[in-house]
Amino acid sequence: MNKLRISFVFSATSLFLLSASVVAKDQHHKNYLPPPSVDSNFHDNGHPAKAKVVLGKFLFFDKILSGNKNISCATCHHGLTDTGDGLSLPVGEGARGTGIIRDTGTGADAVYERVPRNAPPLFTLGAIEIDTLFHDGRVQVDAAQPGGFKTPAGDDLPLNLENVMAAQAMFPVTSATEMAGQAGENPVADAVAAGNLAGTGGVWELLADRLRNIPEYVSLFNEAFGTTANQITFVHAANAISAFERVAWRADNSPFDRFLRGDKKAMSKSAKKGMKLFYGTAGCSTCHSGTYLTDMDFHAIAMPQIGQGKGHGSGGYEDMGRAAVTGDANQRYQFRTPPLRNVALTGPWGHDGAFDTLEGVVRHHLDPEKSLDDYDCSTEPRLPSRADLDALDCFVMNDPALVMNIKNANELGKTNLNEKKIAYLMDFLHALTDPNSVDIRYDVPRAVPSGLPLAD
């Protein structure tokens, strides 16, 4: 009798402990996942004024904002190329074509150099928690600054920019390689060469004056901001471009998003296994954390360096990343953790587009130093060929000392995952794709108010 009673008590206790263990595991499962994406996570509660969005769409695709009127924001961030350009490194002002068929231009119009960093995708950048833009974070929310943002323009940055995306939109037009053109080609390029961004005859004033002289734009700015023609500024343009980008490419209805909102059948079983790896033993969420899968911080992960770099280092062909912004040598080769919505659509991957497949960049994260050693610079990058540019593309990777510098800065250790687990992880990354982003041709207007051609 006593034995039976003792056995029963033990069994009941075991059941209680087992039940508690299941609850604990379920609670852990809930705790490691971020909260779902909701309207209140976005500027303007996710719904900026429609008139701003309409205006921003035209401006984004209009070449009127480039020095030589031959390139638009959309050239490197197109709806036909998943808000990027499909290339490892963009070819900006002077080139022709869209996406991977873009060339390097010809004759006097040929590009001066490749843009030194990959064109980042624009998905989910309207989220308030995404407060740092560009691969090196040189545009950042900073309440201590007069305009609320820390940028390369310093005190020259105008006031009344509505968010960090608008602040970012002020800068591609100030780059000779990206949109302005070379000194001597046009007044905008001359202003860039002189370092005149905000003054009389500066880049932003010259471009705003172009818009003031196009009747349809005057009407659109009036509807969006209540301005008269002479009140239009480039800040208005940047705010409108931001509104368009935030609405068109919000991209937060992926299977993962629906799973976070309570639809437990939204993801496949293999994607769920990949999610547990992502938040568990694979260690991905250490950096790719939060609702939009980025810690908004900077990390050195031994990413191969292709292209001509940013003029850093003794030879001028390196890219020191965050260190070039902060001056902190401990941040050499660190780059911002990118958000991961639609990551399966947005190749090539890496701050310089070093990897042309998503699986390739995932495997790099699992063993960065070996990947750096094994990287084939002659075949992996997706770049339009031109002999003089080709000669610079592998400059760093062909120098063992420079490669060693990148390796020595690496922060990531080796992670051992078998092939089945890597496949699960890939399935989870594909579950971050919003089906509404698979076909975004409708984001491209049929024409723009300047009358300039949309085709590149």
Image: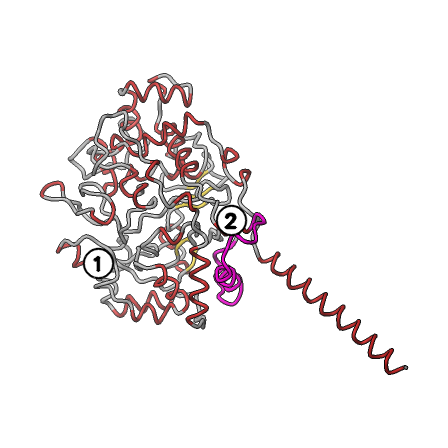
Q: Residue tagged by mark 2? A: 257
Q: Residue tagged by mark 1? A: 393
Q: Nearer the viewer, residue 188 or 101?
A: 101
Looking at the rendered image, the quarter that the N terminus falls into is bottom right
Queried whether the magenta region covers residue 271, the answer comes back as yes
Q: Nearer the viewer, residue 273 or 365?
A: 273
* Position of residue 335 measured from the top left corner of the image (x, y, whole percent): 39, 55
Mark 2 or mark 1, whichever is nearer to me: 2
Q: Amino acid at mark 1?
A: Asp
* Position of residue 22 measured from the top left corner of the image (x, y, whole percent): 67, 65
Q: Bounds of the magenta span?
A: 260-289
Tell me the SS state at disc 2: helix
Q: What residue is at 18 percent from the left and 37 percent from the top?
A: 183
Quarter of the image where one finds residue 450? top left
Image vertical order of residue 354 relative to residue 135, above or below = below
Q: What residue is at 36 percent from the left and 62 percent from the top?
A: 359
Queried whether the magenta region covers residue 341, the answer comes back as no
